[in-house]
Amino acid sequence: MHTALIIDDDADMRRLMVETLRAEGWQTWDADSGERGLELAREHRPRVIICDLLMPRGNGFQVCRTVRGEPPLQGIRILVTTGRAYESDRKAALEAGADEYLVKPFDLAEFADRLKQLAGTDRPAAAPPTPPAAPGANAGETRIRFWGVRGSIATPGPATARYGGNTSCVEVRSGADIIILDAGTGLRPLGRELDAEFGGRPLTLNLLLSHTHWDHIQGLPFFQPLYRPHNRIRILGYEGARSGLFKVLSSQMESPYFPVGLKELPSNVEIDELRDLEFSIGSVQVAAFFANHPGICVGYRLTTPGGSVAFFPDNEPPRAAPGTGSQAAYAAGEARKFTEFLRGVDVLILDAQYDAAEYQSHVGWGHGCVDDVVGIALAAGVKQLFLFHHDPDHDDAKVDELVAHARELVNRAGAALQVDAAREGLTVALQAGQPAELRGHGQ
């Protein structure tokens, strides 16, 4: 006797399929959610699973991936059913582990025949997975690449072509570990590059969010690796000021804002709200520090075998308050803490949105002044400083001016600090004991 598990949140459709199969002599079980269906699959180990694509508490993509990932269940045949006839959904379901794909409404007799054929064949043994690597990097080398450097809003066009108009996104690679810092519009070209580089090989990615202001998350719905079932993407950040991280990220992908919901993505997405300020990702040690910016906002310091990098895309450096009272002492203490957190870092990527004159009318906005940023980098003994979060009203010529001014400040101090402005396409290579090497676009 053939056995089947039917997972579908539509009670009428579930009933029709159960009646059809029982009339053909099948033993059946049924569930109204992916979560419950997986429980029954583990308990009964049916020959075939018929699984709807869009369901609460575990969609069809997730069911397929889970079944294929658990050795006792891997031989089960899976038929995915759906009311959506998109070719991209069919391809994604097959990549996730489905054997067949059937679009509703379908003929029940045809449905029963296809299940008989499916139950009568064994699933081919899967090839052993190829672990992802970070091609092009030397052993012990850490690579940092800028994909989005602009603040507040994307500003494409000829006036920003040299430094770039995409919002915050930086890629860090250390060995096989790929860490993405922020998900601004720069995340879209990064996703296209990863797709081209890795082809059909599975990817494991870690995305660290500094905060959830829109210019730091608006690239997420357009990140191609999210739409590949074999990819695992872990999104880490701290709880928002008014709602949790999952709610913030999912809300920008809800109808009517976006056609695909976060729960409908075929990839294996984990969203983790961080509680600790220190943790590790593979061989990379990560420390977080609360930034001076509205809401819950942090910066990160990554310590890798090749060197260290600190990332503070939105931050207004604390300034000493006038006088000698408690306010002045508090401000001085906060400045010392921030400086010590950055002490000796090899590469510092720091919000430097304003020049000194602009900053006077933007005090308290949560963004940095170039003069203050250089002062902090000098005090902390930073080796390489990248000015970041370029103002949307600053063209390439204005950014050049800010870099020239920053370098002049360093020269007056007689220091060895290297200063550049972050620009899209630029890669920075770190090797233990060696100075940072700039490669790629904009050298």
Image (cartoon, rainbow, N blue to C red):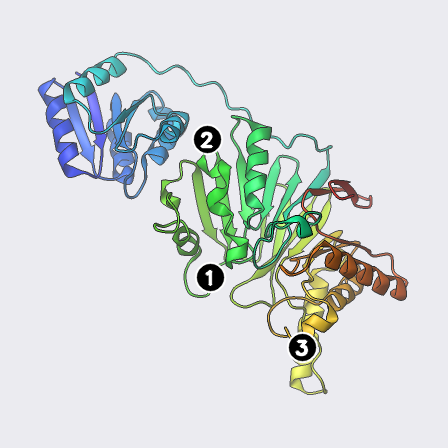
Name the amino acid type tagged 3: Ala
Name the amino acid type tagged 1: Gly
Name the amino acid type tagged 2: His
Rendering coords of residue 433 (x, y %): 82, 44
**The C terminus: image quadrant:** top right
Q: Residue furthest front?
A: 158
Q: Which mark is residue 240?
A: 1
Q: Can you say whether 292 is above or below 139 in the image?
A: below
Q: Quadrant of residue 406?
A: bottom right
Q: Which mark is residue 331?
A: 3
Mark 2: few/some/many CA within 10 Å (<14, 14-19, 20+): many
Which label's residue is closer to the chain start, 1 or 3?
1
Q: Secondary structure at mark 1?
A: loop
Q: Residue at x 82, y 59 (%)?
A: 404
Residues marked 1 and 3 touching at CB (< 8 Å): no
Which label's residue is closer to the chain start, 3 or 2?
2
Mark 1: few/some/many CA within 10 Å (<14, 14-19, 20+): some
Left or right of residue 182, residue 142 in this image:
right
Camera-side residue: 138 or 70?
Answer: 138
The Cα–Cα distance between marks 1 and 3, rounded to whole angstroms, is 25 Å
Q: Can you say whether 395 is above or below 20 in the image?
A: below
The Cα–Cα distance between marks 2 and 1, rounded to whole angstroms, is 29 Å
Q: Residue at x 39, y 51 (%)?
A: 257
Rendering coords of residue 315 (x, y %): 63, 64
Q: Residue at x 73, y 67 (%)?
A: 355
Q: Secondary structure at mark 2?
A: loop
Camera-side residue: 288 or 369?
Answer: 369
Q: Residue at x 48, y 43 (%)?
A: 222
Camera-side residue: 39 or 229?
Answer: 229
Residues marked 3 and 2 touching at CB (< 8 Å): no
To which residue does mark 2 refer?
230
